[in-house]
Image (spheres, grey):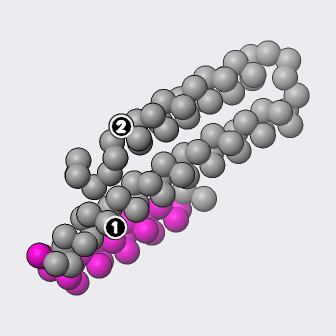
Amino acid sequence: MRQCMDIPKVQVRIRKIEGQLRAISEMVSKDIPCEDILVQINAAKSALHKVGQVVLEGHLQHCVRDGLEHGDAEKTIAEFAKAVEHFSRMG
């Protein structure tokens, strides 16, 4: 698992998202217009989606490639399809 993604890069992205979520929480506590809060929610959602893309790409480049080259290709493809299905539900 550790080899399939750039962990420091993913962690930096996640920390930024955590900051966005804290900022959204503060906006909710203050008298900030709903439209502004929704813009920030959408930005956080997009950032989270991008983290998912980075993880999925790493999975494809390492885990799937390794499974196709050295393991059970059918099982690898089925597991990748399942991962893509889970990721696509995020929308």
The residue carrying mark 2 is 8
Instruction: Say which element carries label 2.
Output: helix
Tag 1's secondary structure? helix
Q: Which residue is at a point 61% across and 29% down the rendered structure image?
A: 21
**Residue plotted at (23% across, 52% down):** 3
The Cα–Cα distance between marks 2 and 1, rounded to whole angstroms, is 18 Å
Q: Are marks 2 and 1 in contact (CB under 8 Å)?
A: no
Instruction: Report the side of 22 relative to 40 (left or right).
Output: left
> Where 20 falls versus 57 (above or below)?
above
Q: Nearer the viewer, residue 6 or 82?
A: 6
Q: Amino acid at mark 2?
A: Pro
Look at the image and give the residue range highlighted in magenta. Answer: 70-89
- Badge 1 crowding class, 10 Å Cα cut-off, few under 14, some 14 to 19, many 20 or more, is some
Residue furthest toward the bottom? 74
Q: Magenta segment: does it hold 33?
A: no
Q: Answer few, some or many: residues within 10 Å of disc 2's Cα (few below 14, many 20 plus, some between 14 and 19).
A: few
Location of residue 76 (image quadrant): bottom left
Rendering quarter of residue 78? bottom left
Q: Earlier in the sequence, mark 2 or mark 1?
A: 2
Main SS, magenta residues:
helix
Which label sits on residue 60?
Answer: 1
Please tell me whether residue 31 is drawn above or below residue 34 in the rendered image.
Answer: above
Instruction: Find residue 73 and report its horizontal and vertical position in percent.
Output: 20, 82
Circle nearer the viewer, 2 or 1: 2
**Three-letter amino acid code of the residue under disc 1:** Leu
